[in-house]
Image: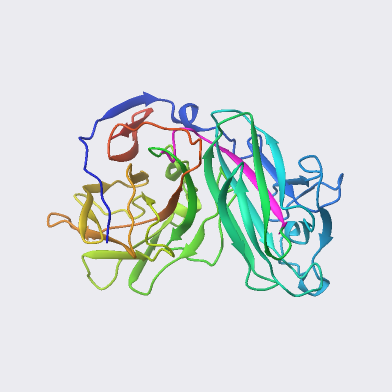
Amino acid sequence: MLVRKTRRPMEMLVVLAGFLALTATVDGQDQSGFISIDCGMAEGTDYNDATTSILYTSDAQFIDTGTNKSISPDLESENLPKYLSSVRAFPEGLKNCYTFKLVQGNKYLIRSVFMYGNYDSKNQAPEFGLYLNADEWDSVKLENSSDVVVKEIIHVQETNYSHVCLVNTGLGTPFISALELRLLNSTIYKTQSASLVLATRLDIGSTSNDTIRFKDDDYDRIWKPYTSSSWELVSLRYASDLLSANPFILPPRVMTTAVTPKNGSRSLELQYDPDDATKQFYVYMHFAEVEELGDGGYRNFTILLNGDFWYGPMSVQYLSPVTVYSQYTVSGTSLELSLVQANDSKFPPILNAVELYWVKEFLQSPTEQSDGEFVTFYTYLNYNSIVITRF
């Protein structure tokens, strides 16, 4: 059953300013907000990833336990990222931790990557605990030697140090392939409290099978392609930078592609089935018009969640990104999103991208205050200024 909290009055805030000065914390061409670690790599063998150009360094300066290992040669390939070729394994000790010196109060995306690769020639993929500081973040379970597991969390730093730990649960030797930290703008991915664990992040309507990340995404979020046979694909012929012009700095390549309902349907449906019905989720939906609809043409629609009113009515403008999310969590055995065309709309709903996160409460989690239940970021050109409207 869907869990909803009482709606509060919405409060409007209008900001007139140069957009990039307000929102950009990481330059798309540099990695000043990045920490990228190839775990198990020999010290002094730094390299730039062939696909993303991200600079990876050895983990030697962040941990003094564990042993360096290489995956089985028969699992190596030209398409395998180099950071998956080595692991740091921890055959000794119950809990082994990486230590990072960070800035208190900053918000970070922390990503850990695991590929067993039969590094120990036992052909027995392990299961173990993943901790952030003193608290469990998640568990790591791999199906086989070539399975790649990625765990990602958005977390506000409570002190000047952070610890990512691998915990032996008696089901095999813990290990890790890569660790990545990305500094985020503090104004995005706000919650009432707690941290956000990634459930899924989808590039809706992708016309390729490509996964999108840095340099297309300034924050190096990883977007997976997703579409459905019940959707009509719509897209621009080029990736306009205008599609990044909201506080989430969405990748133009992601926002360039979108979907609408097929065969004249007035509703666009998307469903996510959690692995645990008690988990509390935040849903982020990203929109932008990518079709020129002509004079008087517009889309106007309402968003339903599990059949109940969630947000709207709303409309989108050409090349003007809009992000809608709830300030309160939802849960259930299934999360069913429905975008329903309004009676006065000439065109059906559109959707470009979706993110879902579940809430992870830590013992000492920072609290972030919000002004209302829903927040919508609109940006559009107004003569020589960019207007950011926050509801």
Q: Quadrant of the N terminus?
A: bottom left
Q: Quadrant of residue 326?
A: top left
Q: Residue at x 30, y 27 (%)?
A: 14
Q: Quadrant of residue 323?
A: top left
Residue 300 shows in this picture: no
The percent position of residue 54, horizontal first and vertical second, equals 69, 47
The percent position of residue 288, horizontal first and vertical second, equals 36, 49
Q: Nearer the viewer, residue 314 or 159?
A: 159
Q: Nearer the viewer, residue 367 or 186?
A: 367
Looking at the picture, the colour scheme in use is rainbow
Q: Nearer the viewer, residue 303 or 132?
A: 132
Q: Residue at x 48, y 31 (%)?
A: 20
In the visual, does 273 lie left or right of 344?
A: right
Q: Which residues are magenta?
A: 175-190
Position of residue 148 relative to residue 294, above or below, is below
Q: Residue at x 41, y 32 (%)?
A: 368
In the visual, does 346 lie left or right of 124?
A: left
Q: Is residue 184 magenta?
A: yes
The percent position of residue 285, horizontal first and vertical second, equals 36, 51
Q: Is residue 133 magenta?
A: no
Residue 50 shows in this picture: yes
Q: Quadrant of residue 134?
A: top right
Q: Residue at x 68, y 41 (%)?
A: 35
In the visual, does 79 lie left or right of 350?
A: right
